[in-house]
Amino acid sequence: MTVSSQVSNRAATILVVEDDERVRRGLQRAFESAGHRVLACGDAAEALRELHREDCCDLVVMDIELPGVSGLALCRLLRAQTATRRLPVIVVSSHDREDYKVEAFAAGADDFVVKSETARELLTRIGAHLEAAERERALQGSNRELAFIADLGRGLLHALSLAEVVRRVAGATYEGADAALCAAALARSEGRRAKGEGGKEDDGLTVCVFDREGTAEEDASLVEVERLRAWLASSPSVSRRVEERGEFFLRDNEHAVEFAAPLRFEGRALGALVVAFDRRADCGQTEERLVDAAAQQAALAARISTLYEAARSASVHLAREVEHRTAEAESQRRFTEAIIDSLPVSLYAIDRDYRVVAWNRNRELGGQGIPRRDVLGRNIFEVLTRQPRGTLRGEFERAFSTGEIEHIEQESQSPDGSTRHWLVSKVPMKIDGEEVSHVITVGEDITARVEANRAVARTERLAAVGRLAAGVVHEINNPLATIAACAEALESRVAEDAYGAGADVEDLREYLQLIRGEAFRCKQITNGLLDFSRARAVEHAPVNVSEVVESAARLLLHQKRGASIKIDVELGDGLPLVAGDMGQLQQAVIILAENAIDAMPEGGTLTLRTLRDADEESGAVLIEVRDTGQGIPPEIRERIFDPFFTTKEVGRGTGLGLAVCYGIVTEHGGRIAVDSTVGRGTAFRISLPAMKTSDGDLPC
């Protein structure tokens, strides 16, 4: 076997990082002779510049020993960045040492090759890794294609006219391929006129075009009809990629490439699916396969539509056409069932005797973990033992009796303790007659949607309260100032014996103190409102979160709140900087710390920590404020960030602290989360996005 037969046939771009110029040139010649494009550099810094400058690099070959930054450090850096995380890396060395190999693979290298006089082994390894990467890309494209086919198959299942077929196919392909324009055209039988709702007939063609705004146009004037008809007349058997503007099928002056797929059935071109892209790079192999798959389904759907119309109009051939269409419909049904079986939702169905008649793949592999063969035919109450039998029976009985779809939101606890939200839909199904024969249950994980809706609702509440506060604070402050000033003036006159002495004067002195004290307490509340409603202009300066926490801890010690509270400060090393306002971030930390101290009336430990987020892809920095206090009950946990909500007694809190803290963190582009156990304590975590340098690294 020759070396060339073992290497991937696809020409690739290879980055060679080698400080020895003689070796570097030798590798460059060997790779170029194998048909690859080579980028060569002598150190890690130059390699990073090449990777940022190049749109595409398929593989990196680097020496383990490089000047300055070593090859292992460069490999770790590539694995830490999203853009190069999956880039194949081969480490080469002049030494066949086991510790070198172990360190290379630990750093994230895909292979380790010992240098030799020839590059035969290295070329073979390169070919293998390029083929593996190509297979991974093909698998990703296949997953996208399968999802698209599933959606399109459901849409075409009930398309019984040519107009419906072209509209559904054009719309689904426009969205699925992320195209600039998309047109579907089907030729009608001679002497027949289409009467569908979508598409407009023109010169024997039923056409639907989705324009740049995503609007379905029923106008064939957007298509070069004669050019398209001439191409279909040639009975094309394969799709066509068009890059010459003079050969385009769609009338548009902006797109750069078209991909046209014939809608073939039984060796005949029934029509065409034409998709336009603004950039040539947007029309890759995945998009081309997607369009081809859509054309195949459209051809089948068009054929079914034609048979259906023919069966209605030609009674003499009714039996044969119905049989033909039934066979194709059964094939389509089996295909649709296979698609539904692959949907990322939990689905099962029961009959009127509560026996399980369907149990999809996701249900088989879900939380129940029961194989399909062990479920089908069994009573549903024997299978779903974790749910209350009475509640479950009531849901099914309502579906059977009313025949209406019911949507139920449920919560469950994950093994890690987090709460998951589910949307469970009970869908009645009628097979024969008007009576509901089966009930389909579909469960969809809507945790992300629920959390997003709650975040939006919380933000809207904060904004509404802020607008209200801004409008009334100044109106309240002036009367409060007058009341306080008058009370102080009267106290002064009482102190000067302006009213003499006696029990009534003592009562007056006590009442004036109460008036002044309550006026100042109202003043504190309005000041809190004003601070909450005031727009905070965040100056995006580099901030070290460890310095923020350190200064906040010093302020807390000077306040001498909670004499029996121990304050621990744990600062992470080498944390990236964040962009924001140091004073506002310090205010947020102090608010959380003061609440923590109030939650430990009998004493405890307040811990302030800074650390890097465990999720390396997020690139976030965390500030954690943890106490060993009373904890937050689950029933009020979702309300703690609402303005004016407080569990403290009257006079000790306004309920604005956490709302202000939430606003500060949000304005810095961060997130705040809480983890609490009643009786054990609470931990608030502020997550802030780290700043990045121009080369994508995180500054420290």
Image (cartoon, rainbow, N blue to C red):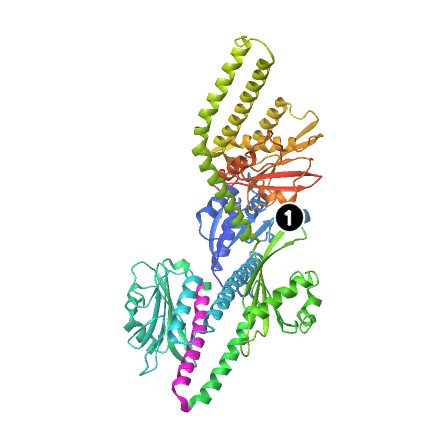
Q: Is residue 204 above or below residue 8?
A: below
Q: Nearer the viewer, residue 78 or 454?
A: 454
Q: Is residue 579 above or below residue 290?
A: above
Residue 408: x, y in percent? Answer: 58, 59
Position of the C terminus by quadrant: top right
Find out whether residue 455 is within the magenta segment: no
Q: Tag 1: residue type? A: Ala
Q: Secondary structure at mark 1?
A: helix
User: Whole-percent x and y of residue 429?
Assistant: 55, 72
Q: Main secondary structure of the magenta part?
A: helix
Please indicate whether residue 21 sits to the left or right of residue 367 in the image.
Answer: left
Q: Which residue does the numbered mark 1 point to in the structure image?
A: 106
Magenta residues (range): 287-316
Q: Where is residue 67 drawn, in percent x and y? A: 55, 40
Task: Count neighbours of disc 1 (C-alpha within 10 A) and say few if under 14, some if 14 to 19, many if 20 or more.
Answer: few
- Asked whether 305 falls inside the magenta stretch, the response is yes
Quadrant where the N terminus sits is bottom right
Task: Count the labels in the image.
Answer: 1
